[in-house]
Image: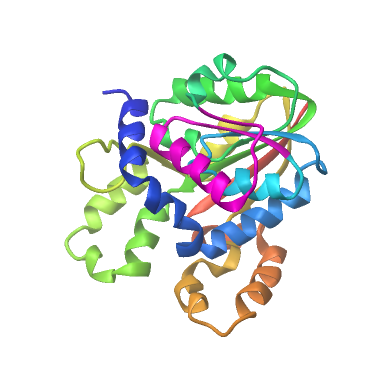
Amino acid sequence: MHDCEKVRAYYDAQAAREWTRAERHPVEFGITRRLLLRHLPPPPARVLDVGGGPGHYSLWLSGLGYRVTLVDLSPGNIALAREKSAELGVALDGCLVGNALELDRHAGPGWDAVLLMGPLYHLTRPEDRQAALSQAVAALAPGGILATAFISDYAPIIDSLKYDPGEIRGKGAELMELFRHGINRGGDGDGFTAAWFCGTAGIEALMNRPDLERLALCTQESILGPYEEALKKAEPGLMEECLELAMAFVEDEGCRACGEHYLHLARKR
C-alpha cells in the first residue's frame, strides 16, 4: 500500500482529533504562527496550504486577510474544514481534496506562498518527497515563500516521555532503531500512520536546491517542548509570555532536542 493510501485512511478516521491538535499542542501552533507572520508577505497575498488538514492555518490566515486555498489528501479533513469555515464565518478561496504528489492538477503557478507543512513527513520514499517538494516550488511565483514542516527524529522518544514515560519500558531498542532509520511504516491500524522522522542534516539535504534560498530552519517548540503540559495548566497570559520568550531561540541549534517539529522557510529564486 502506498503511503498516500495509508495517510488518507488515517486522517479520514482522525479528522476531528486533528482539529483539536491546536488545543493539545499550543506551543507548536503558537510558535508556527509567529514564524509564518515573520516571513510571509502581507495580506492579501495568495497562499496555497498543501496538506493543511482540517484547515487550522488556512482559516487563521484567511481571517487575517490572506487569500487562501486549502488542499488536503483526506476527504474527512476537507469536509471538516468546510464545516469550520461556515461555523467561524471565515471564507476560503478554495477547499479541495488533492494530492501533494499531483499538485499541478489542483493548483496552477504564481502563488505568493505555499505551506507544505504535512506532506513531506508522511512520505517515506525519498523520490516521493522530492516530487512533492518540486511540485510545491513550481507552484510558487518568483520570490514566493515556501514553508515546509518536518517531524524530528527525537519526536517518538519525546512523545513517550512527555505523556507516559512507562511507554519506554522494554522499548528502548525499538525506539533507538526508529531514531536511526527514521521510517514508521504505519497502516496497520495501530498508532501513527506512515511517517519519516529526520534530523537537520536530512532536512538540509532535501531543501538544498538551486531554486530555493534558505531563510530559516527553526524548532517549532523552541525551548518550550518539555514544558508544554505544565504551561497548559498555568495561569492565563503565561503561555503567551513564554511563547514570546521562546521566539528568541527558534533557530538555536542547542534547542533542537527540545522539540518534535522543524519548520524550514525559503524563498523561491
Q: In which quarter of the image is the C terminus?
A: top right
Looking at the rendered structure, the number of numbered marks drawn on it comes to 0
Residue reaching furthest bottom?
Answer: 235
**Is 66 left, or right, of 9 in this rendering?**
right
Task: State the residue in front, 44 or 167.
Answer: 44
Vertical side of 140 occupied by 153: above or below: below
In front of the other: 205 or 32: 32
Q: Would you say residue 93 sits in the magenta stretch? A: yes
Q: Looking at the image, which is closer to me, 241 or 267?
A: 241
Which image quadrant is residue 117 in?
top right
Residue drawn at 21 percent across, 46 percent down: 190
Name the spot of residue 65 as percent of width and height, x first. 77, 45
Q: Within the magenta stretch, is there residue 11?
A: no
Counting from the top left corner in percent of width and height, residue 98 is at 49, 24
Q: In this view, does 143 lie above or below 80?
A: above
The residue drawn where x is 55% and y is 14% is 105
Region rendered in magenta: 67-96
Q: In the rendering, at what x and y percent does residue 62 appear?
A: 69, 44
Q: In this view, does 120 lie to the left or right of 167?
A: right
Quarter of the figure that contains the N terminus: top left
Residue positioned 59% across, 52% down in the render:
88
Q: In this view, does 197 lie above or below 267?
A: below
Closer to the camera in the image, 216 or 179: 216
Extreme top residue here?
105
Q: Residue at x 42, y 54 (%)?
A: 154
* Residue 183 visible in the snapshot: no
User: Looking at the image, can residue 256 be seen?
Assistant: yes
At which x and y percent is residue 129? 49, 26
